[in-house]
C-alpha cells in the first residue's frame, strides 16, 4: 500500500471516529435512557411481584383468622370486613362471607353478598354464574319461580361451567310446576350428556325413578 493510500485510510478512519463521537454526543442519551428504562422496568416488575405476594399473604392471613372464629355470626361479620384488591379475591371473600352468613342463619345477608358478585361486571363470568346458582338454591321459594327459571336458563347454555347443575335445578322447577314429563325429559338429557359427573348422573337417575320413569343411558 502506498503512503498516499495509507494517509487516505487514516484520514477516513479519523472522519469515521469523529462522526461516531458526534453521534454519541447527539444521541447517546437515548442509549442511556433505554438502559435506565430496562433496569427500571425490571425493578418495577420485581417490586410488583413482591407487592402482590405480600397482599396475597395478608389476605390469606385475614381469611384464616376470620374462619378460625368459633361463633358463626362473628365469623360472618369478620369476613364481611375483609377487603381484597384483585377481582378474583373479592369474589372469593364474598362467596365465603355468603356461606358463613347462611351458616349463621342470616339468609338475607347471604343473598346480598351473592347479589354483589352477580352485579359486578368486572368479575370473571364463572364467579358471577356461581353466585347466580347459589342465589337460586339459597332463596328457594322466596324467589318467584319465574325469576328462578330465568336465572337458571341463563346458566344452562352451551359452554357454561354450571350448565348441567342449572339443568338439574330447572328439572326441579318443572316438578314444582307439576310438569313431570318435562322434568323426566330434562333429567334424561342430563344422564346422556357427555360432560355429566357420576354424582349428577346418579341423582338424575334416582329422580327419574321417583317420578315413575325409567332412566335410560344412550
Image (cartoon, rainbow, N blue to C red):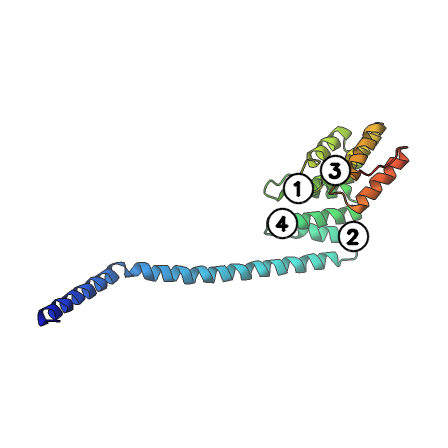
Dot 2 alpha-carbon crowd within 10 angstroms: few under 14, some 14 to 19, many 20 or more: some
- Looking at the image, tell me whether mark 4 or mark 2 is earlier in sequence order: 2
In x, y percent, where is residue 113?
A: 70, 43
Comes first in the chain, label 4 or label 1: 4
Q: Secondary structure at mark 3?
A: helix
Judge by depth and name the residue closer to the eye, 196 or 26: 196
Quadrant of image for the N terminus = bottom left
Q: Mark 1: few, some, or many residues within 10 Å (few <14, many ≥20)?
A: many
Quadrant the C terminus occupies: top right
Distance (Cα) linking label 3 and label 1: 14 Å
For marks 1 and 2, the one nearer the N-term is 2
Mark 2: secondary structure:
helix
Q: Are the two marked residues, 4 and 2, in contact with CB atoms closer than 8 angstroms?
A: no
The residue indicated by pointer 1 is 128
As helix, strand or loop, the secondary structure at mark 1 comes to: helix
Q: Is residue 165 left or right of residue 28?
A: right
Note whether 67 is above or below 1 in the view shown: above
Amino acid at each position: 500500500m502506498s503512503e498516499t493510500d495509507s494517509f487516505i485510510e487514516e484520514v477516513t478512519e479519523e472522519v469515521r471516529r469523529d462522526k461516531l463521537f458526534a453521534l454519541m454526543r447527539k444521541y447517546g442519551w437515548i442509549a442511556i435512557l433505554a438502559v435506565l428504562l430496562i433496569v427500571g422496568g425490571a425493578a418495577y416488575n420485581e417490586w410488583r411481584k413482591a407487592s402482590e405476594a405480600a397482599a396475597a399473604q395478608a389476605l390469606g392471613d385475614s381469611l384464616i383468622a376470620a374462619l378460625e372464629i368459633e361463633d358463626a355470626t362473628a365469623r360472618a361479620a369478620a369476613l364481611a370486613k375483609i377487603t381484597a384488591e384483585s377481582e378474583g379475591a373479592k369474589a372469593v371473600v364474598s362467596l365465603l362471607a355468603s356461606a358463613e352468613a347462611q351458616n349463621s342463619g342470616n339468609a338475607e345477608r347471604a343473598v346480598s353478598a351473592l347479589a354483589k358478585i352477580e352485579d359486578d361486571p368486572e368479575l370473571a363470568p364463572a364467579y358471577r354464574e356461581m353466585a347466580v346458582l347459589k342465589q337460586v338454591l339459597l332463596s328457594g321459594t322466596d324467589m318467584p319461580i319465574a325469576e328462578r327459571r330465568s336465572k337458571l336458563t341463563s346458566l344452562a347454555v352451551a359452554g357454561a361451567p354450571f350448565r348441567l347443575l342449572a339443568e338439574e335445578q330447572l328439572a326441579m322447577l318443572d316438578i314444582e310446576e307439576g310438569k313431570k314429563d318435562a322434568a323426566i325429559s330434562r333429567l334424561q338429557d342430563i344422564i346422556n350428556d357427555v360432560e355429566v359427573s357420576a354424582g349428577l348422573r346418579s341423582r338424575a337417575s334416582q329422580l327419574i325413578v321417583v317420578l315413575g320413569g325409567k332412566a335410560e343411558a344412550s
